[in-house]
Amino acid sequence: MAEPSSQQGSRIMAVTSESLHRDRSNISLGGVSLDDLAYLNEHEAAGNPSKEFTNSPEDKDLLSRFQVACIIVNRMIGTGIFESPTNILQQDRSIGGSLILWSFGFIASMAGTLMYVEYGLTIPRRKMAGEVQAVPRSGGELNYLKFLARHPRYMAICMFGFVFIIVGNSAPNCISFGVHVLAAAGIDKPQKGAVQGIALGTAWLVSLLHALGRMFGIHLNSVFAVTKVSILILIIILGFIVLNNHIEHLHRDPLSYTNLNPETSFKQLGTGDHARGFAAAYLNIIFTCGGWNQANYVLGEIKKPTARFKGISLWTVGTMCLLYLLTNIAYMIVVPIPQDADFTNGETVIAQFFKRTIGRTWTERRAIQLMDACLAVSSLGNVIVTTFTAARVKQEIAKEGMLPFSLVFAKNVNIIECVIKKFKRSEPVIEKTGTTAQEGVVSTPEKAKFEPIPFPALVVHCAFTTILILASIRVPRSKDAYPLLVGIYTYPIDAMAPICLSLGMIWMRSKASSEWNTYSTSNRWFSLATAIIVFVANSFPVAALWIPEPTLGSSVPWYIVPTIGWTLVFGGFIYYLVFRFAVPLFLGGAVLEVKRDPVIGIDHDGHFVQHGEMVYQKWSVPEDDNLPYLNGHNIEVELK
């Protein structure tokens, strides 16, 4: 395919439902199977510095229902459900108020899940077989913001990409792992250097594990997800054992009876920092309940996404909300909460819980060490899943051309494959036979199947994780580094991005003539209601965090998180201006043209899925006759 214009048939590879087969290698597109077509695209890209072909995982390696659920679970269960209850109680000063906020968080999580599922299964859309069809793609908010803000060109891509590349990494949980693994080892006050060293080692090791094997990382993620759920179930069981008072040494403290009594649980409501206290508490809940959008980041790697994605997401997030509610109830059953929600010696709810359950049959010190071990496991699991999903998003950002040397970071590079090729270059090539339209035979080399791993994007992810870990050394207290890094990620990514997406959904759904109402399979009014819930739920903390905090509970000033959050967004806008105007001026009027040509087949349920993608990027002056794609991102269908 020397010129793209001569290969119109391969630019959108669609098949009709009559051509459906159970193995994608048997799906024939003009006489060429999808696997052969993928090889030909790879061969073409290898000889063209302006092109890069990325293959999707084999059918057998696509994410199953269980693996998708584990991705969501492993991301949702971090240290938040263990540590946030204390912060939430101290911020709103009310047990009843905190439970109400948790309920709001659960509703917002379910609404957000529904909205993200609708976006994921509706765009991008492509015209195939005479109809406009949705083809799920990895990338999450990148795709949705790009769709909503098509003009000015590249602005949404640059702003989201800039923020996500900087803060969308594993730094917070790497630091949390360092703190808790040392505490589990009996080091109560670890040196800052020791924490940073463990955090750096964790980030590099996990990145290396994902670079060596995609399926290894997926299986490891599943193991940690099951372990975390088991920890929550253990906490719930212990709580209800204490409630029954039938086991020796596990009797309920009489002072804890007032925790869930409606007459006393709302007594201190409104005595905290009022609006800001509620906002800070709710932002903690958003973070704790966050992670429900992780499957959107790898949507293109899910098996049968159109048929399975919605059900998996809703059931998983709903189950997690139920587990979170029962976990909080277990805390309230066991731990007497002071009226002012201030614990002596800086203890937390989870620490008191372990002391009053496991500590009574073991020792309090060992119970606390076990607690820290559980928190370390939760943090490490979060690092594993974040590294897997965030690297895929960074690869999608690179495919949009906004990074220097974007095609380098858009590559799939398998280290094991590179090593094998290095030692077997002289090995003879085995031929395989397939049919062509003209002569009936085409010979393409038989090559081993290697997992597509975005190694360059993993390097970017690891690099910025390292930078933030090193930057956190400036934080006076190590324990404050984690909430700070969490805040500067949650504020722009988990709060501001959903606000933008909810506004877009409200705008599209409020117009009866909008084509979104035709192509989306979700009920119009239900979709509008979920978008309004997401908007309200996220707007409150984004605005209220600017209210000054009268108390000093942290070494980090109250205004740091919102200031850094907005600074990152503004930095993304500056990056867009440089990318859109300064760089073309420097290059003599050249403009960046990006074309993403998918290789598309049909899954077993008759829905379109993407098996690979040819990415074309080139800086050229508009008068260049050799520039094949003058309209940039015009392959996707725009809805009105």
Image: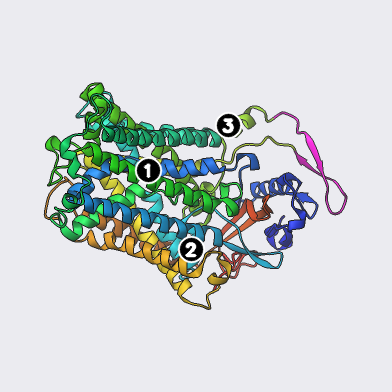
The percent coordinates of residue 352 (x first, y second) are 21, 34
Task: Give the residue number, with chain letter if any, for mark 1.
Answer: 323
Q: Residue at x 68, y 49 (%)?
A: 604
Residue 94 in sight: yes
Q: Nearer the viewer, residue 575 or 178?
A: 178
Which residues are drawn in magenta? 426-445
Element at badge 1?
helix
Residue type (three-letter) at the residue carrying disc 2: Lys
Marks 1 and 3 sit apart, C-alpha to C-alpha, by 40 Å
Image quarter where the N terminus lies is bottom right
Marks 3 and 2 sit apart, C-alpha to C-alpha, by 35 Å
Q: Residue at x 15, y 46 (%)?
A: 553
Q: Nearer the viewer, residue 142 or 106?
A: 106
Figure check: 276 above or below 132: above
Task: Give the residue number, with chain letter if any, for mark 3.
Answer: 416
Q: Main secondary structure of the magenta part?
A: loop
Residue type (three-letter) at the residue carrying disc 3: Ile
Q: Is residue 136 left or right of residue 367?
A: right
Q: Is residue 52 left or right of residue 501?
A: right
Marks 1 and 2 sit apart, C-alpha to C-alpha, by 35 Å
Who comes first in sequence, dot 3 or dot 2?
2
Q: Residue at x 33, y 31 (%)?
A: 374
The percent coordinates of residue 378 (x first, y second) are 36, 36
Who comes first in sequence, dot 1 or dot 2?
2
Callout count: 3
Element at badge 2?
helix
Task: Give the residue number, with chain letter if any, for mark 2.
Answer: 146
Element at badge 3?
helix
Mark 1 or mark 3: which is in front?
A: 1
CB atoms at circles 1 and 3 under 8 Å apart? no
